[in-house]
C-alpha cells in the first residue's frame, strides 16, 4: 500500500547526468528495473521513474540534490537488491563522506 502523501515523479534520462528530485538519498533508495525505465523509491520519500534509463548503451549518472552521484554501471548492479543489501554494500563508505559512487 502506498502512502497517499507519497510524491511520484516521472523524469527523462539525460545523456550523461540525470538530476533526481529532492528527497532521495543514494544510501536509502530502492532500485528496480521496469521495462526500460529505472524506478527509484526513497525510504520515506518520493517514487521516481526515470524513463528509458536502460535504453542507453551507457546509462547516465544519477545525481541527488545534495550532490551525491551513482554511476550508471553501479545503478545497474543495485537494481533488484533489497534496501538491506544496498545498506550493507554502502556500509564501507561510513568512515568517509559519500559524494560519488562508481563502478568501472
Image (cartoon, rainbow, N blue to C red):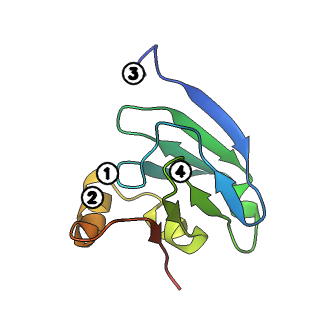
Question: Which mark, residue 16?
Answer: none
Compared to residue 91, the image places residue 8 above or below, namely: above
**Alpha carbon separation for disc pair 3 and 1:** 17 Å
**Which residue in the protein does label 3 denote?**
1
Dot 3 or dot 4: first in sequence order is: 3
Q: Is 67 left, or right, of 93 in this rendering?
A: right
Which residue does the image show at 51% across and 65% down from the upper left? 70
| Residue 5 % position (x, y) | 46, 15
**Alpha carbon separation for disc pair 1 and 2:** 6 Å
| Residue 55 % position (x, y) | 76, 62
Provide the secondary structure element on which disc 3 rests. loop
Q: Nearer the viewer, mark 1 or mark 2?
A: 2
Question: Which mark, residue 64?
Answer: 4
Q: Determine whether label 4 and label 1 are within 8 Å by CB.
A: no
* Residue ranking furthest to the top: 4
Provide the secondary structure element on which disc 2 rests. helix
**Alpha carbon separation for disc pair 2 and 4:** 17 Å
| Residue 48 % position (x, y) | 58, 39
Question: Which mark, residue 87?
Answer: 2
Q: Determine whether label 3 and label 4 are within 8 Å by CB.
A: no
**Which residue in the protein does label 1 denote?**
83
Which residue does the image show at 31% across and 51% down from the upper left? 83
Amino acid at each position: 500500500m502506498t502512502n497517499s502523501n507519497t510524491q511520484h515523479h516521472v523524469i527523462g534520462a539525460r545523456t550523461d547526468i540525470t538530476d533526481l528530485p529532492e528527497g532521495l538519498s543514494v544510501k536509502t533508495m530502492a532500485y528496480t528495473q521496469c521495462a526500460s525505465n529505472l524506478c527509484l523509491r526513497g525510504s520515506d520519500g518520493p517514487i521516481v521513474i526515470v524513463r528509458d534509463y536502460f535504453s542507453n548503451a551507457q546509462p547516465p549518472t544519477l545525481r541527488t540534490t545534495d550532490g551525491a552521484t551513482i554511476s550508471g554501471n553501479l545503478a545497474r548492479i543495485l537494481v533488484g537488491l533489497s534496501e538491506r543489501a544496498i545498506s550493507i554494500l554502502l556500509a564501507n563508505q561510513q568512515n568517509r563522506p559519500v559524494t560519488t559512487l562508481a563502478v568501472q
